Image (cartoon, grey):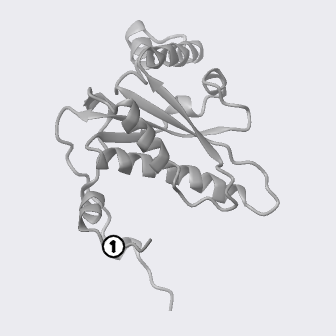
Amino acid sequence: MSLTQDSSTLDLLSVRRSVGPNFLSTPGPSAAELETLLRIASRVPDHGKLAPWRFIVFEGAAREKAGEVIARHYAQANPESDESRIAAERSRLARAPLVVGVVSRAAPHPKIPDWEQVLSAGAVCMNLVTAACAQGFSASWLTEWYAYDRGVLAELGLSPQERMAGFVHIGTATSPSPDRPRPALAEIVTRFA
């Protein structure tokens, strides 16, 4: 298959921006749309064909169930927190209609460095965000504190060797998201001579 220049893809990539989960609402992707999103997300560079990542889908009541885990661990670590703060932690995965956790399964390999495997999981997150935008949804790729809390991760089903590459929140934007300043190419590009 030959790839030709597709201005619609370039247009999408040139205007894509994250929309925070507090500004995402229903509708979210249907079951068929979600399947397409996950299939596209998994089409990333993957040296050695290891698939060093996997998905955890949080939708419906599962978002609240995961929120209870997050809130409990937050309250244990921060006993001085008031109920409004605990409630905010409880709603972490309920802000958008769909959240996809991307788990990095990077592991020692005789030929494939850990770093390449981790980068592959990052590419999965970006493909997922871009595919959601191409479907007409908005998305945000976040980690936040609970992505690094081993107690939370264990209760969400991660093994001790796995890490959370990110939580991708997907839904319909409730308001336009302003663009943020982007770096000038002159500040980030050098040429080897």
- What residue is drawn where x is 41% and y is 15%? 85
Establish if 38 lies above or below 99.
below
Residue at 43% over, 46% down: 128
Count of numbered circles on the image: 1
Residue 136 sits in which quadrant? Answer: top left
User: Residue drawn at (50%, 29%), measured in percent from left and top?
Assistant: 57
Task: In the displayed orientation, state which residue is furthest to the top.
Answer: 83
Q: Is residue 143 left or right of residue 112?
A: left
Task: Tell me where residue 53 appears, x and y as whole percent.
Answer: 61, 44
149 or 124: nearer the eye? 124
Return the x and y of residue 55 as percentages of the image width and height: 55, 37
Horizontal and vertical percent position of residue 36: 42, 43
Residue 47 vs residue 62: left or right?
Answer: right
Which amino acid lies under the numbered mark 1 shown in the image of this protein?
A: Leu
- Quadrant of the snapshot with the N terminus: bottom left
Residue 89, placed above or below residue 24: above
Q: Quadrant of residue 8?
A: bottom left
Q: Residue furthest bottom?
A: 193
Q: Is residue 169 visible?
A: no
Q: Quadrant of residue 138?
A: top left
Pointer 1 residue: 185
Between 106 and 71, the one nearer to me in the picture: 106
Secondary structure of the residue carrying numbered label 1:
helix
